Amino acid sequence: MYIQGVLTVAMINIISATGLAVFTGFTGLFSLGHAAFMAVGAYTSAILTYFLGVPYVLALVAGVLASSVVAALVGYPTLRTRLRGDYFAIATIGMGEATRVILENLKITQGARGLPGISQYTTLPVAAVAAAIVLALARNMLASVYGRNAVAVREDAVAAEMSGIHLLRTRMISLVFSAGCAGLAGGLYAHYLAFIQPVMFTMVQSTQITAAVVCGGTGSLTGPALAAFVFTVAPELLRAAHMWRLVIYGLMLVLIMVFRPQGLMGYRDLSWSTFSTLAARIRRRTPHGKR
Amino acid sequence: MLLQTTITGLAIGGIYALMAVGYSLVFSILNFSNFAHGSVIMLGAYAGYFVLTRAGAPFPVAIAGSMLAGAVIGVANERLAYKPLRVRNARPLYFMISAMGVAIFLENLVYATLGAHFYSYPEVLGRSIVRIGEASIGVLDLFALAFSSVAITGLHLFLQRTKSGLAIRACSFDMTVASVFGIRLDRVVGLVFAIAGALAGLSGVFLGMKYMAYPTMGWITNKAYVAAVIGGLGSLPGAVVGGIALGLLETFVSVYVSSIIRDVFSFSALVLVLLAMPNGLMGKYVEEKI
């Protein structure tokens, strides 16, 4: 039961990390407040199932839509300033603060006390299927023309724009997708924990997602997913180190930027062919070893 | 009431300006948002606190101590976390992630070692109040305003009148060309981080005296960053104008509207300014340097 719970949370974190991987890893923008998108998704879907009795799946979809809309509202004025990604980053901090203040002061969210007694619909299979869908979607999206455009924008925005790529549109699509993933993760999370509170969606959560993406590797999908998994499971194994977890995350971000900015799996992805080439290499090597 | 709000707003705006100048100074040279600046301010506040209480030193010594600590931390931060990236010409995104890492690292290191509790400064300046007409203003606010004006004026003179200042201005214009003309980039960048750190230490002491010292106080400085963006990143006069405008806005909102939604107002102001003037009020360029 406990292991199942940890794995469910890991799946949820994989979803939000995949979203951020598209945004930071492939489009080259930085967000400091992805937890706020999670909060919007979590509260929207929880309120829908809790107060209005909306079916679970529909509520999740509504959560995704709500966080995408919020993302578009924050993203448009800040990403519109052409080549400056920093403005968006600071706007996400503001959005995080504003979301917290609003959630703590609205009646329907029951303020800082939070919403208890949400139905526990999210199980491991549900979360795993959702994660698989998100990963497949992200993979296809990045393999499409859109994905190439996003990478071009990341590598050199000026050159990309000169080749006729619409900067704002490319960045907005990436943002909306990424916020949608965060919203989905939030909705799943709310229906897994059965209780949500504004303080759950703070910098700590955002930091964890960012750390997973950066360590997993920019320009990779499986890297961040793997890292998100490890970052969820490892702290459970090392409960004692709880206080130092964030210290280590911070140190890790700096060390990776200094020594290996592409992350563990930068610009590469695990796929079936990776395994088959690996297997082939091992097969080729073993006879020599035996002789 | 109006006069009092204005002066309180100016005092808070002065501290914001002091912090925003630190952001803008680094931005003008390295072209990225140094999110670690807030942590340096936080450490400055702790340094000032410990010099005052543990060493029992007088107030001016505490200010000097925390400015020194801020400068040292700032330079160490640059040398360890940014220089390797600078040397290989990394993208601003990488600098930002590294800065974020430093901020998270320092904040949680303090949290893990000194604990989450609030250190309240001893009452050096007392709670005494000066009356100007009908307004009563805290001595602390007046000191904050005076110190930040002096520091910012000093910085302005330094940048305009000295040779090192000229080097900094040259680098902010174009680092490569400046280095071709024989300016030592390492030295200039170090100097910039030392100045930014010293200003961070100074503002840390005043923030600590106003709101106490605690690990996450660095996040107050997000507001200073907002001020820098409103004024136009990379522009020092812009940082000052943005800081004071934001300080006034916040004080007026919390007095006349509601202090709960104060932050929502500040960030909405940011979005509105960016919509109307993507450069900020006094920014020079919209685009990242190519």
Image (spheres, coloured by chain):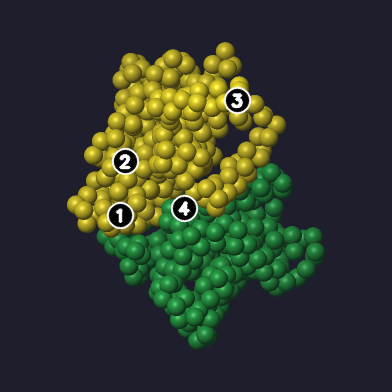
* A55 with respect to A1 (left or right): left
Distance between the alpha carbons at the discs numbered 1 and 3: 50 Å
Chain identifier of the yellow chain: A
Q: Chain of mark 3?
A: A
Q: Name the residue type under label 3.
A: Gly
Q: Residue furthest right?
A: B55
Pick the front one: A33 or B127: A33
Give the residue at mark 4.
B94
Residue at left offset 63%, top offset 62%: B76
Crowding near pointer 3: few (<14 within 10 Å), some, many (20+)? few
Which secondary structure lies at badge 4?
helix
Chain B color in figure = green
Tell me the mark number nearer the camera, choosing from 2 and 3: 3
Which secondary structure lies at badge 3?
helix
Same chain assignment for discs 2 and 4: no
Q: Is residue B225 visible?
A: no
Give the residue at mark 1.
A157
